[in-house]
Image: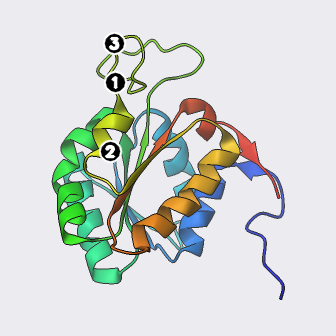
Amino acid sequence: MTTRRLLQDEISVPEAIVRVLEEAGIDMVFGIPGGNTMLIFDALYDHRSTIRTILVRQESLAGVMAEVYGRLTGRPGVAIGQGAFILSYALLGTLEAYLGSSPMLLMADLSDNAPFSHHAPYQAGTGEYRTWDARQSFAGVTKITMELHEAVQAVQSTQLAIKHAMTGECGPVALLYHSAALKGCVGP
């Protein structure tokens, strides 16, 4: 039995993440570019023939749309946004996905801008130096929450998150990307 590699050459992490979404059959994502998620939205633009990106006015709409997409298609609905905002505003859709067993991915950055963060405490969700703890906040409304620090970990965890969202009782999974994880490259 032969296996097909996801990557043939070294590419950026956001490009690899979008390829993972494509491979999973996800053809639509919802969200607002902000922080380091801009890198994912840039990669999505290059795949606009296979993945339709719906930009919403507010993150709450992304959460509800992603939940409905997951419920209707059986594939994870994807909501992308900046950490604090995707948590607080997309909570309605996330709760519905959690209680209604709809597969869903919440993809957020932590706005940490490593190695030094100059954001206000309400934005950087690392849980350090009096900032809010994004991982703990998402944990109560998701099946699993993953905090990603490195490039390879970001791509592999995106694959794992899709599996968790669709395995057993379906539900939402949160991916929290540190800035260093999204700015790296991965290879075969």
The N terminus, quarter of image: bottom right
Vertical order, 125 against 38 (above or below): above
Q: Which residue is mark 1?
A: 123
In the depicted structure, whether residue 126 falls above or below residue 91: above
Closer to the camera: disc 1 or disc 3? 3
Q: Name the amino acid type tagged 3.
A: Arg
Q: Nearer the viewer, residue 116 or 99?
A: 99
Q: Position of residue 41 (x, y in %)?
A: 49, 50
Q: Residue at x 50, y 35 (%)?
A: 36
Circle 3 is placed at which residue position?
A: 130
In the picture as drawn, the residue positioned furthest to the front comes out as 168
Looking at marks 1 and 2 on the same chain, the residue that comes earlier in the sequence is marked by: 1
Query: Circle 2 sits on which residue?
Result: 139
Q: What SS does tag 3 mark?
A: loop
Q: Report the Cα–Cα distance between label 3 and label 2.
A: 19 Å
User: Which of the two labelled residues, at mark 3 and mark 2, occupies the earlier sequence position?
Assistant: 3
- The answer for how far apart the CA atoms under marks 1 and 3 are is 11 Å
Label pair 1/3, CB-CB below 8 angstroms: no
From the viewer's perspective, tell me whether residue 72 is left or right of residue 129: left
Q: Quadrant of residue 16?
A: bottom right
Q: Is residue 105 above or below residue 136?
A: below
Q: Secondary structure at mark 1?
A: loop
Q: Residue at x 55, y 57 (%)?
A: 158
Residue 58 or residue 163, whichever sits in front = 163
